[in-house]
Image (cartoon, rainbow, N blue to C red):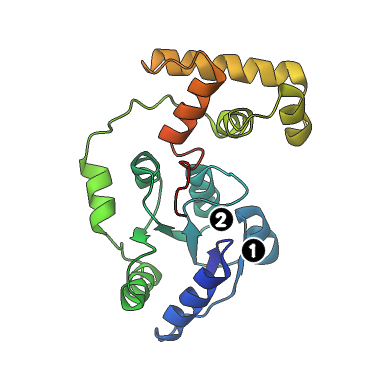
Amino acid sequence: MALVDDHELVAVAVQDAIARIDGVRFLGSAPTVSELLATHPAFEVAILDLRLADGSSPVANVERLDAAGARVLVLTSAESPYLVRSVSKAPIAGLLRKSEPLPALAEAIRRVAAGEESMSADWAAAIDGDPQLADAGLSPQEQTVLSLFARGLKAQAVGAQMGIAVGTVDDYVRRIRAKYVRAGRPAYTKVDLYKRAVEDGILPAPDADR
């Protein structure tokens, strides 16, 4: 079992929970999915923080771990209902709030490691509830562009950080705006783009408690 999280306290709690489970071994942790796959290429279960400091797409992270053959248990503070709904449709084996007590975390890990699903109230509500906001259908690359551009970076800085041309960044922004218009959630200004990014869980809400 491995962990993707950038908080030391979460790693301590996960190791404590795993110590309570017979037959489950903790292999290590990393702050990003890329680093985990590079350092621990073989593991059967991955515990994934829903929102990482690198700004990566939670759905894309789940899909990468699933492609690597891991069953994924998502940990979330559930501050973004849209993000929880989005990841609930990805190939996860369980979803748990970070506020749950340690025995609940240990039980969720045990179930996922045993090949079962760990259905929480948040996961059930995400599956059963109708989205309040129409999904714009942004690709992982478009989400990355939006997360950088909506934070206030200029197109040149976004392009330099992502290794793409300024014209390509402009094309991405145009496509992002068009998708939000089709979803009935126009984003004509940079402030609008920031609001859409917060609504969709691509950026954290101001003062959100991760």
Q: Position of residue 128 (x, y in %)?
A: 20, 42
Question: In the picture, residue 183 is in which quadrant?
Answer: top left
Q: Which mark is residue 68?
A: 2
Q: How many marks?
A: 2
| Residue drawn at the location 62% of the way across and 20% of the way down | 172
Question: What SS does tag 1 mark?
Answer: loop
Q: What kind of residue is marked 1?
A: Pro
Above or below, comparing residue 198 to residue 41 in the picture? above
Q: Position of residue 6 (x, y in %)?
A: 59, 61
Above or below, comparing residue 113 to residue 5 in the picture? below
Q: CA distance from mark 2 to mark 1?
A: 8 Å
Q: What kind of residue is marked 2?
A: Ala
Q: Residue furthest front?
A: 207
| Residue drawn at the location 32% of the way across and 68% of the way down | 100
Is residue 6 toward the left or the right of residue 168 in the image? Answer: left
Question: What SS does tag 2 mark?
Answer: loop
Is residue 62 toward the left or the right of residue 123 in the image? Answer: right
Question: In the picture, residue 153 is in which quadrant?
Answer: top right
| Residue drawn at the location 50% of the way across and 50% of the way down | 51
Q: Is residue 1 visible?
A: no
Q: Position of residue 197 (x, y in %)?
A: 49, 31
Look at the numbered discs 2 and 1 and tell me whether their residues touch, using CB distance below 8 Å: yes
Question: In the picture, residue 133 is in which quadrant?
Answer: top left
| Residue drawn at the location 39% of the way across and 53% of the way down | 92
Q: Position of residue 88 (x, y in %)?
A: 35, 46
Residue annotated with mark 1: 41
